[in-house]
Image (tube, rainbow, N blue to C red):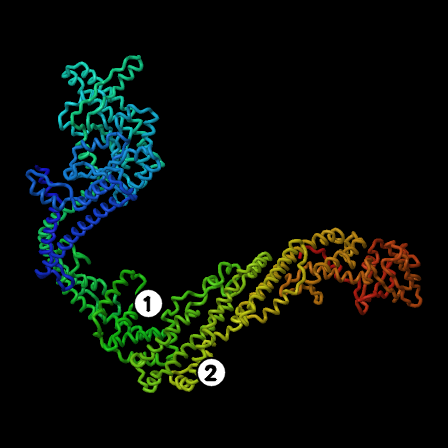
Amino acid sequence: MIKKIFGIIFNPWVLLVLGLLALSLVIWIVGPLVAIGNWRPLESTTARLVFIGLIVLLIVLRQVWKLVASRKKNDKVVNQLLAPAAAASPGDGEVKVLNERFAKALQTLKTAKFDQPQGGISGLWSGLSSRVGKRYLYELPWYVIIGAPGSGKTTALVNSGLNFPLAAASGEHSVKGVGGTRNCDWWFTDQAVLIDTAGRYTTQDSHKDTDAKAWEGFLGLLKRSRPRQPLNGVLVTVSVTDLLTQSTAERAQHAATVRARLQELHQHLGMRFPIYLLVTKTDLLSGFMETLGDVDKDTRAAPWGFTFKLDKHQRTDLSAFSTEFDALEKRLTDGLIGKLQLERDSGRRARIYAFPQQFEALKGLLKDYLEQVFSPSQFEAHPLLRGVYFVSGTQEGTPIDRMLGRIARTYRLERTVVPPNQSSGKSYFLQRLLKEVVFAESGLAGTDLKWERRRGYLALGAYVAIGLVSAAVLTAWGISYFGNQRYVDKVGAAAEDVKKLVQATPNRNSPDVLVLLPALEATRDLARASIGDSVPLSLGFGLYQGKKLDAASQQAYRRMLIDAVLPRIALGIEEQLKTGNDNPELQYEALKAYIILYDPERFDPKALKLYVTADWELTLPRAVTTEQRAALESHLDALLAEGAVVSPLPEDKNLVAQTRARLVATPLTERIYRRMKRQGLGAEFPDFTVVAKAGPGAPLVFTRGSGQPLTKGVSGFFTHDGYHKGFQREVERVASQLADEESWVLGVNDSKRRDALKNMDIKLQLNDEVRRLYLTEYAKTWEEFIADIKMVKTANLAQAVQMARVLSAPDNPLVPLLKAMSRETTLRQGKDVVGTVEAKARDALQKSRDDLMRLLGNRGGIQPVEPGQAIESIVDDRFIGLRQMVSSPDGKLPPPVDGTIALINEVFTLLIAADTAVKGGNVPPPSEVPNKVKAEASRLPEPVRSLLNTLSVSGTSAALEITRSNLGQAINTEIGEFCRQAVAGRYPFARSSQRDATPEDFARLFAPGGLFDTFFQKNLVNFVDTSVKPWKFKSVDGASMGTDNSTLLQFQHAAMIRETFFRGGGNQISVRLDFKPVEMDATITQFILDVDGQLVKYSHGPQIPATVQWPGPRGSSQVRVQITPVTASGASGLVTDGPWALFKIFDKQQIEPAGGPERWKATFNVDGRKAQFLVTTSSVRNPFRLPELEQFSCPGRL
């Protein structure tokens, strides 16, 4: 009874009606309180009734739509079932009768609804709910029964106790299918549709291909008929007879067949469904009728079996089978004693006693069957086996006593025949199985039980919430009333605090608005002092008093804005007008804002806010936070939102006049141009940078001479896009704005000037003059930027080679950079079409231009444009060389920049050759490429000219540096080491040395073709300038090997020594001397100088010169001086030996100059007696007076 009452209360239709009543009540009560601004849409009774009626109508329409949709789906199912699979044979009467019967049944089902009303106490309500709660055939759960032929499928359905509505009309429980289902029996019950498939569909052992095709057609029919949920479950039947009598191979084959059919269902229907295994013909177990035949009706109707529990993944654990089966067997065993005591027939008692063993014999067979059919596989869909149930439809046939048969076979006894069953007309364990187990789980197919439960809980919660909301409304009104009372009291207390804060605010004679911020915030938020910006729920429900209180606080707030904020703004502007003379643009904006404050006709809130906020950004202390600045701006918005405002302070007209006079002195064109620059025009366009245009290889090659990074370049204001998309689009607007503002901002009352500025021709010319200012600075900016682009200085030859490689590569950064710069410096568009039109207009307006300049005041310094020439030529003409370099002359020939890249490639090849040479220790080969680069670079525009020269010079310098290092090593190896061994510290290089340099070593070093001469001619002759003294490295291709040093000086000394000692060009020392007697002591009768057998004699006779060759012809290396007579001491002369004996003999004598470098007087002194000779060499380069001998030192490194 209670269950039925709850069923009535929680019936969906009852809940729907209750929900509508609650919603209608809320609309009726709360509706008048709902307002959108000042409009209350549900204030009138009619409006509320209409709104409630619309809601009810929408719900009714939704139910009607659901009814129509269900009917359409039901008709679709019926039509699908009636569709023929193949044409019937002519004259096939049986097929015709079957078709007529099936069609008639389905036509009945088209309009039939199921779930008939029940009688009893709730019959009236049940009858009402049945009329709205019946379901169509489409909405009933559908089940398929599969099993082998003779497995008892049909018998189980006939004896299931289900209600078959068509049985009364047709006389049969089932309807034979037609078309695609002609091999199926359709069982239409009031709770479900059961499809009994032909047994050969399962086994497919008669006509395999035909049966398989028919089975697949049947599955397709299910899918088409009910696409969302073709089936709600599958009943698999297996008879006890098959389990007990079939061989192991036959059972395995049968299990595999059933498994295949189930997998085909999964695959074709694309869904997961519960499977119920019915073990039929249980009555054929020996002892079944004796044990269970007398159970009562309720026991026979109850299921006998077990249902598996599902894990969290909705899968069946087959390992629970043994436990569940043992529990069934235990139930049989527990009731065995009572049965045996009541039975008197010994035969029956024996079968009763053996029945548990007979039942237990099924366990192993059934377990194998389950594992073969339902065991999970990773390659197949996991079957959802819900349970195993034992049933008996009719009790016919001879029971199978497998235990006695086994004993008889074992002991070769005669097999006892068990008496056949007598049909009792009863079914066992069927009726409640289908109704309460199978049909009750119809929602398992393709759904999640947990989700279903959650959905039910949510629905229940929603219904409960509707009731709670209705009850909460009255409570909310009470809470809101008392809350608003407290809120009004609190705002009143806060008003007193705000009043004290406002009174403590400093007077308005200061421009500081920051001190007003606390008072402004407190005044504006007075009505929201306790709740902030949102209205708490506890103060709502139509009783909120905040709006009324807020209106009063807003009036006070507005008065404070006018009386306190506005005067401070005016004072701030006045201060700017007095002190900001260095910034004319800011002065202009300040003057404009000041006039706006005192002239309501000129009130412009946007312009005024723009100036005030900009002024705050400049003047407010850094300590002011972002939040404080935002708060000030919000108060400024509130001040300007109500329309024109006039400062209560008096206007300072003298200050206005002074400022106007100062600003008018600046020509209008300059004011326009400066305005455009200060407005940040072009900020939306990217700056032109070398890195952005030349690519990632730019830092390897380029640098800025000014030290600026490559990521910094020309402002977007001075770019092609900045001109065409920024400046050009704004110049007319800004020019027109400032021209129009002159009369009221600057007070210009010159009628002639005003008329001129209104003339369209003059306006165009004014725009051109502003453009001219811009383009002049544009050109200057780009000239400075291009001149600042330099090549990276190379530290060594490898870096120079790398730089040349990058510049000569196909993806070099130079070409895209030049093209990008050419685009930015080419402002005329098209082939001067626009420029030509404008030029003609300028020719016609030349006279007007002259008048305008006289009016506006032209300060000069701006590049003029010739008549007929586009104004952009101010920029374009300055960079024509750059443009020509990247443009093809006739559209066919390659641009000149390609030739430049080829030239750079030649430099690259030269540097590679130089690098190879210096790495091998050789001198770089001579080349005309540097001269070619110089000649070509002189004709190229910047920055290419500087880049080419730098590349050539830096590469040559690096090569020379390495060459110098290599030559230094070679000098030390080829000359230095031997030189230090042969002449260092030896005579004649060290006059006091007792060791002599051998003539052979001297010649090897200094003779023509000697070490010094050979090395110099081979390695240094091209790098040394010998025309100057001292020698120095000369410039080679714009670079040199460095400054002069001691090593180069030694080569110069060596050259002098060579010219002096090897005058004949041979490799032997050759010096010729002439000796002419000058005077001789009278005590000397004869003087003889013997130079290696060459005698110079003098005996106070004629002064005849004598010639001596050194070294002498005999090679004795001895020089003798002999006088006669012998001195008193016995000395008769001097003797000197060695290769440098002649030099040494002179070193010991008195030497005096004799009028030239090639002549000197030598006085020979032998024990106080003297003979003087005039000695003359064959050259002014006197080997005996050669300073290079003493200055010479062996070279080290360059």
* Amino acid residing under circle 2: Pro
Nearer the camera: disc 2 or disc 1: 2
SS category of the residue bearing label 2: loop
Q: Give 1164 or 307, whichever is nearer the viewer.
A: 307
Furthest toward the left, the residue is 121
The quarter of the image holding the N terminus is top left
- Do the residues bearing badges 2 and 1 touch, measured as CB atoms within 8 Å? no
Question: Disc number at residue 618?
Answer: 1
Furthest toward the front, the residue is 91
Where 78 falls versus 765 (above or below)?
above
Q: Give 1087 or 785, whichever is nearer the viewer.
A: 785
* Residue 39 screen position, x and y as percent: 14, 64
Number of residue marks = 2
* Quadrant assignment, res 1034: bottom right
Instruction: Tell me if mark 1 has few (under 14), some (14-19) or many (20+) residues whose alpha carbon lies within 10 angstroms of its own.
Output: few
* Residue 477 screen position, x and y as percent: 9, 54
Can residue 451 be seen here? The reply is yes
The quarter of the image holding the C terminus is bottom right
Q: Which residue is mark 2?
A: 867
Specify which label sits upstream in the sequence, 2 or 1: 1
